[in-house]
Amino acid sequence: MQKTFEPKSFEKRIYQMWLDKKYFSANANPNKKPFTIVMPPPNITGQLHMGHALNNTIQDVLTRYKRMKGFEALWVPGTDHASIATEVKIIEKLASEGIDKKSLGREGFLKEAFAWNDTYGGRIVEQLKQLGCSCDWERQAFTMDERCSSAVLETFVRLYEKGLIYRGDRMIHWCPECRTALSDAEVEHKESDSTLWYITYPIEGEEGVTITVATTRPETMLGDTAVAVNPKDARYKKLIGKKIALPLTNRTIPIIADGYVDASFGTGAVKITPAHDPNDFEVGTRHNLERIVVMDEGAVMNQNAGVYQGLARFDARKKIVEDLTALGLLVKTQDRQNNVGVCYRCDSVIEPYISRQWFVKMESLAAPAIKSVQSGSIKFQPKRFDKTYMHWMRNIKDWCISRQLWWGHRIPAYYCGACGDMTVARTAPDSCAKCGSSAIRQDEDVLDTWFSSALWPFSTLGWPEKTPELGYFYPTDVLVTAYDIIFFWVARMIFSGLEFMDEKPFSTVYINGLVRDSQGRKMSKSLNNGIDPLEIIDQYGTDALRFSLLLGIASGADQRFSSEKIESCKNFMNKIYNASKFVMMHGDKAVADITSIKNLALSDKWILTKLNDTIAAVTKALDKYESGQAASLLYDFTWNIFCDWYIECAKVGLSSGDAHVAQATASVLLHVQTQILKMLHPIIPFITEEIYQHLPIRAADSIMIDTFPTKGKNYKKDAESFEAVMELVRQIRVVRSEKKVPPSKKIAIYIVASAGKEKLIANAAEYLAKLGGASSVSLQKPDLQSIEMVSPIATLYIPNNELADKGEELARLKKELAYVESELALAQKKLSNPGFVAKAPKALLDAENDKIVKFTDLKAKLETILANT
């Protein structure tokens, strides 16, 4: 081993060794139980960030742990084509080169997209390898690869044939910037400052009679086809059925009654714009109202907007408000807070928009997915995220799956140019089945990105083919993901697995929290507070980063990342490295089988018992997927118990001069160190492998294919006895600290055993000497004045003159005596002054008398101590 811990010197070498020996590979193995995780596929637009680092470290810990526990552990890696995000990036890249997307044509653009994937999809894979991910890279998937594309095609056709996919004109969320439809889950709602405009509409044929509506979107009034009131609202009963002259247009529209209207909001009368509001769309459907679209796909006013045609929506809003004001129809405005829907990718305000799109009927798919979580067949960890899932699933709407993009899985619907007939098929038809025409064109739209990733747990294993891997590794065991994609991805995988595999896709959904900055803020570009994990790796090493991300975390809980924490974890790596070097200095004395050693020392039995407790606790934590708890347990055991206590105890045995004792100590040292390395390996794989390769005794070619530790023999009573000895050491250390005794100064210790503890105290003498910094340990009571400490096993004495340098102690005592004498003289002077005694209140006189008594007594004690020092 190198003299100092330098992770750069071995991390790449070790990872390449793992790859070369195919340690990450997994295959259907009837002699082993499978354990499967599928990686949440990162977008090919991205690079490794702290969220990826945490999420993938947790997955790697679980995979490595299960592999060491004897499972056939498969971690399937892959990337997502991320249709909207990637298309936006490619368009930006082309624009910087002076190229317009349309000028390339669809095929040319797709060539650019696949080239992008080759460059940037591979980048994040290499970064995940730097993180130490033990994925089966030979099974790496991509949502647009041939295998996944085949699964997407089969899924679409089956759902269509089952009547669960349909095409229709519906109100959808539309992003005017990305120029595509969005699903409910792709719309984020942000609190925004808004205005409520009160607009008066004149009643047709009734001079001076008006009705006032309140709206946050005056620009859509050009598409109004009714004004609605609540049928129970007495204010408007006489107006129901009448018509109004719609301002700024030459149209009249009816006043209708509908229970949807909240009589307490605004004026209790609302404008109905069926083509530009989802609730108005439903009202319009009930009342058979016309749907007038007044904007185009870019949110620019169209020909139905009259004189406002060509204005962007918010410019049109401003002009319409000005015109209404000029006509005297704007009654008032009111500031308010409003939830505004924005595109999750580009942050543009979305438009409710009527468009012909493809949808999946969700009611029948959602029911078994709800039941799977209700019944406990699928568990969220922590359980509170059940509520998030249930809220989405119980309020689910049909899923809009079509996107007006070129990058993605193209919808397998084909149209006849002659008769207009539509066919959904697995392969493109040569001619129309209805009229025989060969003028066939495919639907231009692509599928929502989440349509393909919903199939991820089984498409990556070969479905729709019945591959050996699919039969063996499905269902997977645990999904590790963040809480922000529970509906985007988790819910869709659940109903897809139940629908196509007749089996849940996983048993547990482990939710990891966010990695926030040191102030608790979410990392973002706008705050410029992001931390690049690759920079941390370059500076501190991969293991320090991984350990800092896991130490002390709990499922579902956010954490703060700080430089202090990463420094602390780097120090822990150094501690492990240096402790291992010490152990291996004596490794030539060790034997492999510690059960063959007779007459183990008390400290040996104690550390083996503490090791067993740690193995049990760490195993329990990892079986529950709580890697943060496991990291904390191992940190405490390694640093506080093994390094701070046992290694110091071991120095007693190693230097005893007894070959048997030295061999026993060296063997226990090496055994415990090896078990620590094996327990730590899933969390910090590189340093543990580097040290393991230098161990004088090891059971495997690599630590990652060695077995995870199991409990050995316990020595409970001996361990309890040694804990009592350790308590004596702590008492000595407290006294030394309080008396400011330098660590280098040795002191004489006297100890008298309690009844029945004579043998224990005799055996403990060497430990007390070594760990307590003693020059000698005498099994008797001293004659000198001493500090006395009582414990259940003994009374311990430290002579006062041992606790400080004699010269320093004399100087201190003389200084203290001079102070006491001056205070005594001052009090005596005051009380000998007749004027002071005559004027001073009784309380002050009593205080001065008390001082004389106190300082006279202290003076006598100090003079006695000085005489005996």
Image (cartoon, rainbow, N blue to C red):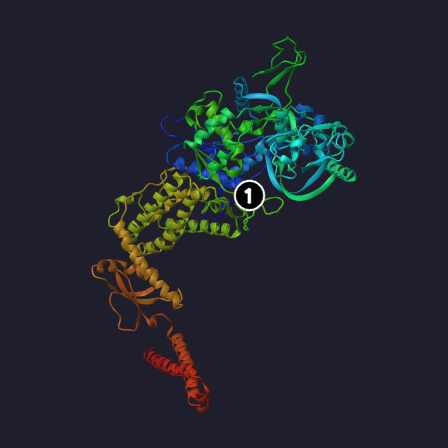
Indicate the position of residue 450 as horizontal and vertical percent values: 55, 29
Looking at the image, which residue is at 39% across and 76% down? 807
Q: Quadrant of the C terminus?
A: bottom left
Horizontal relation, residue 509 to residue 802: left or right: right
Horizontal relation, residue 159 to residue 659: left or right: right
Of 162 and 88, the residue lying toward us: 162
| The residue positioned farthest toward the left in the image shown | 756
SS at badge 1? helix
Of 777 and 175, the residue lying toward us: 175
Indicate the position of residue 845 as horizontal and vertical percent values: 42, 84
Q: Which amino acid, by three-letter code, is at mark 1?
A: Leu
Residue 272: tell me if it is visible.
Answer: no
Q: How many numbered marks appear?
A: 1
Query: Toward which corner of the image does residue 50 lie, by quadrant?
Result: top right
Horizontal relation, residue 821 to residue 7: left or right: left
Looking at the image, which residue is at 70% across and 39% down? 198
Of 565 and 511, the residue lying toward us: 511
Please determine whether, in this image, residue 90 is positioned above or below residue 195: above
Q: Residues within 10 Å of mark 1 (few under 14, many from 20)?
A: many
Residue 255: tell me if it is visible.
Answer: yes
Indicate the position of residue 569 as horizontal and vertical percent values: 47, 49
Q: Which residue is mark 1?
A: 534
Looking at the image, which residue is at 26% across and 70% down? 782
Looking at the image, which residue is at 79% across and 31% down? 307
Indicate the position of residue 442 as horizontal and vertical percent values: 63, 18
